[in-house]
Image (cartoon, grey):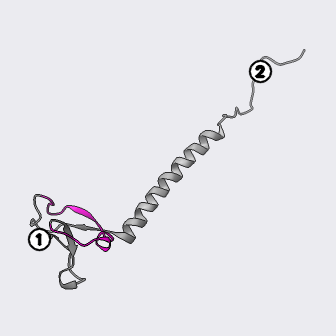
Amino acid sequence: MGRRSSGLNFRKKRIKTSDGHFKEVLVYILSIAAAIGMAFFLVINWGMKTSVIGNSMEPTLYNGQTILISRLAYLIKKPKVGDIIVFLPNGNQYTHYYVKRVL
């Protein structure tokens, strides 16, 4: 008489998970979180989001279209003819940004 072959077994069966799969999923989650965090940091510090108001920029940009603006682009080089720029009229901070093309 050795082993029991019949009867009820109330022990919980453990699901075997390999540590490799858990680490791989964790690395993916952390990589995605880091990329999202870096994108927010860059946009907040060196970029800006604004909407186009009016139809003066059609057919390139349309009324209500949201655009992302690089604040560093013209620190590196000066705008040239044909570039699209964003500015506050007369430096007035209480109005919307103008989106225009350099002539």
Task: Tell me the kind of residue under disc 2.
Answer: Gly
Location of the N terminus by quadrant is top right
Of residue 75 and residue 20, the one placed in the foreground of this image is 75
Left or right of residue 102, residue 30 in this image: right
Local secondary structure at mark 2: loop
- Comparing marks 2 and 1, which lies closer to the viewer? 1
Location of the C terminus by quadrant is bottom left
Q: Is residue 61 magenta?
A: yes
Local secondary structure at mark 1: loop
Closer to the chain start, of discs 2 and 1, is 2
Q: Position of residue 78 (x, y in %)?
A: 25, 73
Q: Residue at x 60, y 39 (%)?
A: 21
Residue 94 vs 44, above or below: the answer is below
Magenta span: 60-81
Q: Which mark is residue 7?
A: 2
Residue wearing tag 1:
103
Left or right of residue 74, residue 46 in this image: right
Q: Residue at x 10, y 61 (%)?
A: 58
